[in-house]
Amino acid sequence: MNTIKIDKKTCLMVAHRGCSGLERENTNAAFVAAGNRSYWGIETDIHYTADGKYILYHDNSTPRLCIDEMVVEKTTFDTLRSLTLIDLDGKKGRSDLRMPTLEEYIGICKKYEKVAVLELKNAFPREQVHEICAAIEAMDYLQNTVFIAFSYENLVYLREKYPTQPAQFLTKAYTDDLIDLLKAQNLDLDIRASALTEENVAALKAAGIRINCWTVNDPEEAERLIAWGVDYITTNILE
């Protein structure tokens, strides 16, 4: 499958879990595939492990992509790292398809000069939010990282130490209190695309809030959202 190019105008494109339309999601192969294309950013998901380390994977448990049945946050880093993921054809066999480390992901983003869009999965303790930031800062890439999270508290913890760090609140729905929530912590928005209307996009833009939307793989839908004025589109395959 080839990536589909659209007229992006000023909208910035984010590769969802890497270029997951071409390579297995959230693997170094997917990150490199995105790096070799015109995407502005590369999105991924970070969990902490049972032994207090970090691993990149979307689901809370492993069977969808690993066959093996494990809960990510109750399993050690070394055990998770030893698993090979199934390829897009549903088969195992590629030894490179493993859960990446935070350092590998940031290293790829840095090499290809892509913005790291990092989802803090589930609820993180304050110390771990700050520890993740410190690890990225040590790699001299915090200024090129955007944090996203469904947990509002994760972003509150981020703001305590990093008041100007780019961050987006993830949500599946547009609610009446959303703009106030975002403005209270100086956050932008990362929202399910189907929750957006031309009217609420206009309201968000009037409030000075930048809008990311997910996951958009249909060119016509992308062009409609771009016409409404969204700032970012997160996609598996559009470019």
Image (cartoon, rainbow, N blue to C red):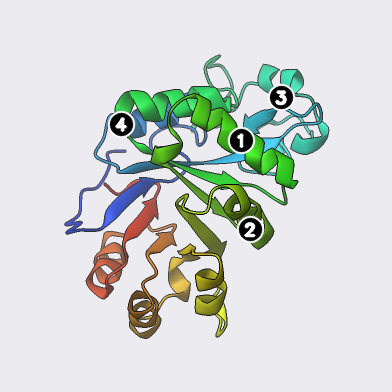
Which of the image's four quarters has the N terminus? top left
Task: Locate residue 172, reporting x and y percent.
Answer: 56, 68
Mark 4 vs 2: CB contact within 8 A:
no
Depth check: 180 or 217 in front?
180
Q: Is residue 160 left or right of residue 232?
A: right
- Residue 190 in picture, x, y percent from top left: 47, 61
Under mark 3, the amino acid is: Leu
Query: What residue is disc 1 on?
Result: 132
Other residues around mark 1 within 10 Å, as few (<14) / some (14–19) / many (≥20): some
Instruction: Report, in whole angstroms, how far the alpha carbon at label 1 lies from the one at label 2.
Output: 15 Å
Q: Which mark is residue 80?
A: 3
In the image, residue 144 lies at what x, y percent? 39, 39
Q: Mark 2 points at which residue?
A: 156
**Cα–Cα gap, marks 4 and 1:** 20 Å
- Seen at 62% across and 53% down, the residue is 160
Residue at (38, 35) in percent of width and height:
22
- Cβ–Cβ below 8 Å for labels 1 and 2? no
User: CA–CA distance between discs 2 and 3?
Assistant: 29 Å
Nearer the camera: disc 3 or disc 4: 4
Between 162 and 1, the one lying in front of the other is: 162
Viewer-closest of 110 and 131: 131
SS under mark 3: helix
Q: Residues within 10 Å of mark 4 (few under 14, many from 20)?
A: few
